[in-house]
Image: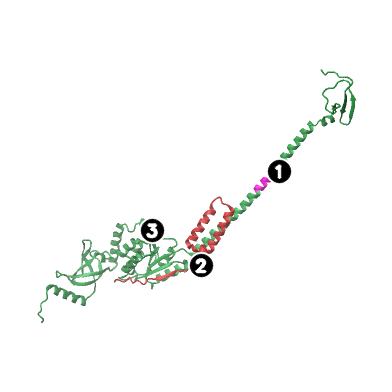
Amino acid sequence: MDTNPLSVSDALALINQTLEYAYPLIVIEGEVASYKINQNKYVFFDIKDDQATLNCFMMLYQQRTPIEDGMKIRLVASPKLTQWGRFSLTVREIQPIGEGSLKRSLQLLLNKLDKEGLFDPKRKRSLPSMPKRIAVISSTQAAGYADFIKILNRRWGGVEVIVAHTRVQGAQASAQIERALNYLNERAELPEVIAIIRGGGSQDDLSTFNDEPLARAIASSRVPVITGIGHETDTTIADMVADVRATTPSDVAMIIVPDREQVLSGVHSQVSRIAQILARSVTGQKNDISASLSRSLERIENRIEQTRRHFDYQQSVLSQLNPRSALRRGYSLLYNEEGSLVRSVKTGDKIRIETDQQVIRAGVESVTKKQ
Amino acid sequence: MSQKNNNSLTQDLAELDELMAWFEQDDFELEQAIAKFETANKLADSIRQRLTELENKITVLKENFEDK
């Protein structure tokens, strides 16, 4: 036996190297016990079964799902001997297993996020009605993605669609979707909306979307997020945090873009309505013109009548004033020799008498002053 | 029409909405209305054409979102 002694630290390093070589990652299922968080950073707990217990350690930010004592979980970890000589599992991933644990974990997360106000309807933003640039996070191989693209292309055009391909189920899926979401939020040209899409699946598959860091990434997204995950009856935490929850991937397409047929029919009705208003206005104005013309004619007729009546009246006044009409009534006009109307004469003057029918020349025999 | 092509589809639709609102007002001048009606018709044609022809441009990002 090689008797070259190792220092304690070297021995520890050697054991850890051997462990790492033999078991780089180990997957264990068991029940959680003595769960605690220290300094809001470090997580310590035990994983146990009926006969054995192992110490576990992990960083809080790596814990994507809440757990508590008594919960059944599956964990992925690296075995390690600590510098104090204690054997511990450095945990990379944890996942509740079994219906009871899944439900409990989900409830814990719901309570936590609800307390922080992440589901508050006031936080929800509305989506643009006709986006020009949209982003999609999905697996491009998923049926739900194909449905989404088909409906999108049928309904609308001219949209720049940026697709971030990620896993949508399995242990890595939540983290990938979270990274894609953060990446899209950091792009120079931001999309106007981000759609997270996944077709139907089992409750276990959809648990990808019941993930705390993903929920937080959705809540803090600069760009409004719409989710279309699973079927109508499925609701995940991602759906609850998103600005808009669509029931399915096809529903996402129907919400984010308008239907070109509907828009066209709207445009058609608008133009028809404008034509109708215009036609009505033309008829109205035509009638107005006729009405104003006939009003003018009426005015002119009235004026003519008035003038005629006035003229008749003047005629009658004039005819009464005419001395000739007095002659017709039996009066005579007397002129002197100079041809002026006689107002007074003296005996011997020559006068001219004009009656209605005759002109008489006569001499004045006598003049008597009228009393 | 060529001038209208510089507008986006949403701008054209908004312009059509404005024209509609103009026509909905109680009083307007007929001559102006006829000119506006012609504009509305041109806009509708342009929108119709674009909606029929426009296609979506789909780009799948090359970025890998796997854990590094």
Residue designated by label 2: B52
- Please state the chain letter of the residue tagged with numbered disc 3 in the rendered image: A
Give the image quarter of residue A271: bottom right
Disc 2 marks a residue whose amino acid type is Thr
Q: Which mark is residue A188?
A: none
* Circle 1: element type: helix
Rendered location of residue B39, percent (x, y): 55, 59
Q: Between A327 and A31, which is closer to the camera in this rendering?
A: A327
Q: Is residue A55 left or right of residue A158?
A: left
Rendered location of residue A237, percent (x, y): 33, 63
Q: Earlier in the sequence, mark 3 or mark 1?
A: 3
Residue designated by label 1: A301
Q: Residue furthest bottom?
A: A1
Rendered location of residue A223, percent (x, y): 37, 62
For chain A, the rendered hue is: green
- The residue drawn where x is 48% and y is 60% is B11
For chain B, the rendered hue is: red
Cα–Cα gap, marks 3 and 1 = 71 Å
The quarter of the image holding the C terminus of chain A is top right
